[in-house]
């Protein structure tokens, strides 16, 4: 059915399947309701959060080299969600550290933080990807000295009061704690099967999903026979990475990337989807790793980036590494446009300039504090709604949210394996060609990603215009942006 541009909140009426007739929906609805109630309650349950964080940390410790697994510490809160930070590390911009500038990496005169950091025993090193060298530096204590999370937070605050851009090195998870017992629940697949790609004048949209990776579809145990996820490529989700050597159970965020990929494919079956692994299978990622994968995805030519992850920060300040990655991406766009102008006479930037869209989940924090990277101005932030299109209590919200769609009981492709009792008190076994329902803004964001890809392909419109039209089709809800119904929920 054609795109509906009116602000009814239903941009593609009648196009996406509802319930299977033979599914026992009453039982599934009860499970989803239990999960979302638990999700909304989690901010008020410090004991539950802290026990989950203790178990997460314990699963990462024995026998793993430091550069293989991101170790984290916690700054606890009683109400709200605890701040997760990479252990023993701060981030600072190169200009704040020694006056260097991103364009040449050379020091420039002016006040810098280097002398102060030398005096307190902190040393600087480059982060992992070359594109961020000189822009972002990692600060660690000299001689292996340990600083606890509060000491690191205090140093970062002192640096900021002196006018320098520094922060904790944030963890940007796929919400293993905020999802809590809101684990995936087994569900029947939509019928009749994978949708036929729509005809349209536009080329297939190149979509990058930065997440946990995708199940190894070449592995006989994970290979799908139902036609879904065909053509999707990218980094592999190990599924059973923790504790070291595995325990025969799915990790706490296993299958997250596979689920997100299935959502994009349901909405935009023509899209060329590539998955980049920034998050481990327990749902933990450093902001630096996410930033590096964002840059890698844009260098590979992707047009839309989906980020079903995010964090709140200690002082609600934007994460330094992801901010730097957005600057790098903007520079890459401009450089490509300059090359295009030189190659083609009459190049029209209004329709032909490269414009990478970045779509991010608004978070499951249940408050109005910004969640990053969704809260960056150039990122499309997506909050979660209940199936009746009313705001969900568990969803982050605020003036910084651009749009929202159903995030409760969303159905998508899952992986083969047995759940851990750490995430579900009644663990399920998922068989071949598994489907599940899951709740969270992680699963609202890829619906918007898919809708943008579909508009780009069907009407051959620039992505910026596709975004404008999609938002115009939504119904405004205070703090939830423009509300859109795409996939159904439960």
Image (cartoon, helix red, strand yellow):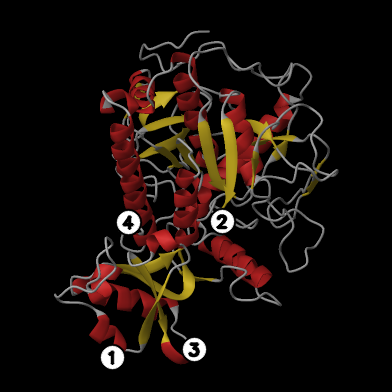
Marks 2/1: CA distance? 37 Å
Q: Which of pointers 2 and 1 indicates the residue nearer the eye?
A: 1
Q: CA distance from mark 4 to mark 1?
A: 27 Å
Residue behind mark 1: 119
Give the camera-side residue of 131 and 374.
Answer: 131
- The answer to whether marks 3 and 2 mark residues whose Cβ atoms lie closer than 8 Å is no
Residue 104 in the image: x percent, y percent?
27, 64
- Residue located beneath label 2 in the image: 177
- Separation (CA) of disc 3 from disc 2: 29 Å
Q: Residues within 10 Å of mark 3 (few under 14, many from 20)?
A: few
Do labels 1 and 3 touch, CB within 8 Å? no
Q: Callout 1: helix, strand or loop?
A: helix
Coordinates of residue 36 in the picture (x, y in percent)? 57, 41
Q: Is residue 438 above or below residue 269?
A: below
Which tag, 4 or 2, sits closer to the chain's start?
2
Marker disc for residue 144: 3
Q: Nearer the viewer, mark 4 or mark 2?
A: 4
The span from disc 3 to disc 4 (Cα, nearest Å) is 28 Å
Q: Which residue is mark 4?
A: 318
């Amino acid at each position: 059915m054609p795109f509906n541009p009116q602000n009814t909140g239903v941009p593609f009426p009648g196009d996406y399947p509802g319930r299977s007739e033979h599914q026992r929906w009453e039982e599934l609805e009860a499970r989803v309701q239990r999960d979302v109630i638990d999700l909304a309650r989690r901010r008020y349950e410090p004991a539950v959060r802290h026990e989950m964080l203790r178990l997460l940390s314990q699963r990462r410790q024995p026998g793993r080299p430091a550069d293989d697994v991101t170790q984290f510490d916690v700054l606890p809160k009683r109400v709200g969600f605890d701040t997760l930070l990479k252990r023993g590390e701060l981030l600072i911009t190169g200009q704040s550290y020694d006056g260097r500038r991103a364009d040449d990496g050379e020091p420039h005169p002016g006040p810098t933080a280097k002398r102060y950091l030398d005096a307190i025993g902190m040393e600087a090193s480059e982060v992992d990807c070359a594109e961020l060298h000189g822009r972002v530096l990692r600060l660690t204590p000299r001689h292996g000295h340990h600083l606890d999370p509060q000491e690191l937070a205090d140093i970062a605050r002192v640096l900021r009061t002196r006018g320098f851009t520094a922060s904790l090195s944030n963890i940007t998870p796929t919400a293993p704690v905020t999802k809590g017992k809101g684990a995936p629940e087994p569900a029947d697949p939509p019928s009749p099967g994978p949708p036929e790609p729509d005809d349209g004048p536009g080329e297939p949209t190149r979509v990058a999903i930065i997440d946990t990776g995708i199940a190894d579809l070449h592995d006989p145990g994970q290979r799908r026979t139902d036609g879904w996820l065909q053509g999707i490529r990218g980094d592999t989700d190990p599924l059973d990475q923790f504790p070291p050597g595995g325990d025969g159970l799915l990790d706490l965020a296993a299958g997250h990337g596979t689920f997100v990929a299935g959502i994009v494919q349901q909405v935009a079956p023509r899209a060329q989807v590539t998955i980049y692994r920034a998050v481990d299978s327990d749902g933990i990622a450093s902001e630096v790793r996410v930033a590096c994968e964002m840059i890698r995805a844009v260098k590979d030519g992707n047009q839309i980036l989906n980020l079903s992850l995010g964090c709140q920060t200690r002082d609600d300040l934007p994460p330094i590494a992801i901010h730097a990655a957005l600057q790098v991406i903007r520079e890459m766009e401009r450089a490509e446009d300059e090359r295009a102008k030189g190659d083609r006479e009459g190049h029209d930037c209004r329709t032909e300039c490269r414009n990478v869209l970045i779509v991010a989940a608004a978070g499951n924090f249940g408050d109005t504090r910004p969640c990053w990277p969704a809260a960056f101005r150039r990122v499309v932030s997506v909050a979660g709604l209940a199936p009746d299109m009313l705001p969900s209590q568990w969803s982050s919200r605020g003036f910084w949210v651009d749009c929202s769609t159903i995030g409760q009981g969303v159905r998508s492709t899952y992986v083969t394996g047995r759940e851990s009792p750490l995430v579900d008190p009644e663990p399920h076994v998922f068989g071949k060609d598994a489907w599940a329902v899951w709740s969270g803004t992680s699963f609202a964001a890829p619906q918007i990603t898919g809708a943008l890809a579909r508009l780009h392909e069907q009407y051959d419109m620039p992505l910026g215009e596709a975004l404008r039209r999609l938002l115009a089709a939504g119904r405004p809800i205070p703090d939830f942006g423009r509300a859109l119904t795409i996939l159904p929920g439960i």
